[in-house]
Structures are given as C-alpha cells and as structure tokens.
Amino acid sequence: MPPRRTTTKGFARTASLLTGKIRKASESRGFAQSRLLTNWAEVAGEEAAAISRPVEVSYGRGGMGATLTLLTTGANAPVLEMQKEQLRARVNAVYGYNAIARVRVTQTAATGFADGRVAFEHAPKKAPPPPDPALRAKATETAAQIGDNSLRDALARLGENILNKQNR
C-alpha cells in the first residue's frame, strides 16, 4: 500500500500555529488553563460572564492558593461578591484541583465599560436601512439604456448604493 499523500500542500491549521502563542500569552497573566479565558461564559455561567471578565491569576509566595482577579463595573461588583464561592468552585473544576483559593473583584479599568457591562465582545452590526423605492427607480431608469442585462442590473445596483449614501 503506497503512503498517504498529504492534502495540505505544506499548509497548517491556524489553531496549530497559534496554540503556543496563546498559551504563552495567557500564562504570562497566570492562566495555566487558557480555557478559563476562551470559554469564560461556559465556566462562570452566562449571568456572571455577562458582567465580568477574568483578568489575572496571581500566586502567593508559597505557590499554593492562587487569587483570581475579575474585572467588572461598579454596579455589578456586589452581585459578584455574593457569587465568589460559586465562581471559585466552577473555576477549580476547570483546573481539576483546588488551584484558586480566593476570588478578588476589581473595578479599576477606566475604559471598556458601556451600558453597565464590561465590553469585550464585538458590537453587533447594524442592519442597513430599508432601500428607498424612489432611489431604486431613479437608478434603474438611469441604467435602462444599457443593452446587456447583467451589466444593466449591476449598474442599477451601483447607482442605487451611491444614491443611498448621498441621502444619508
């Protein structure tokens, strides 16, 4: 049986290229488990993840009993304070042992806050406004002299887009 030929032609998956760099960056902040950063909503729960983000894991001098620092807004800090023990238990379940001894809530970031929640997600894209029928008719009328159907339709769409942008 002949050896299997590779189908990647020398290309590698992005995940395999970035895994080491992601691990190095997360370990520099004390995160031995990068899953804690990447899957924070799954680890902490949807409600806690919506109002907080893990910032750092710091280890004491003895190396036992790390402190997990969570970033949140001022209004949500009391809510997180009440959930500290549940969060600690859930995070330790990710590590597989009692790695986190304390959870500290901080509100020190002056930027990144919007509408009472820490804003690290991408903003949702706004839906484009509905097309104006009068502008569509004007663009179609302007392109009506073109003989090729596909070119005429493309020019009509282009004209409509230009007219819509000028109207905004």
Image (cartoon, rainbow, N blue to C red):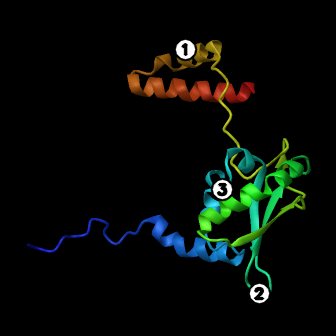
- Mark 1 and mark 2: Cα distance apart in space: 79 Å
Asked if residue 152 lies left or right of residue 97, the reply is: left
- Residue drawn 60% across the image and 15% down it: 138
Between disc 2 and disc 3, whose residue precedes?
Answer: 3
Between disc 1 and disc 2, whose residue precedes?
Answer: 2
Q: Please say whether residue 135 is visible from this viewpoint.
A: yes
Disc marking residue 141: 1
Q: Report the front residue among 146 and 149.
A: 149
The residue where tag 2 is placed is 62
Q: Secondary structure at mark 1?
A: helix
> Looking at the picture, which amino acid does disc 1 mark?
Glu
The residue where tag 3 is placed is 40
> Taking 41 as reference, is 92 above or below it?
below
Where residue 56 appears, as percent x and y from the top left, is 76, 69
Label 3 packing within 10 angstroms: few (<14), some (14-19), many (20+)? some
> Looking at the picture, which amino acid does disc 2 mark?
Gly
Label 2 packing within 10 angstroms: few (<14), some (14-19), many (20+)? few
- Residue drawn 60% across the image and 24% down it: 160
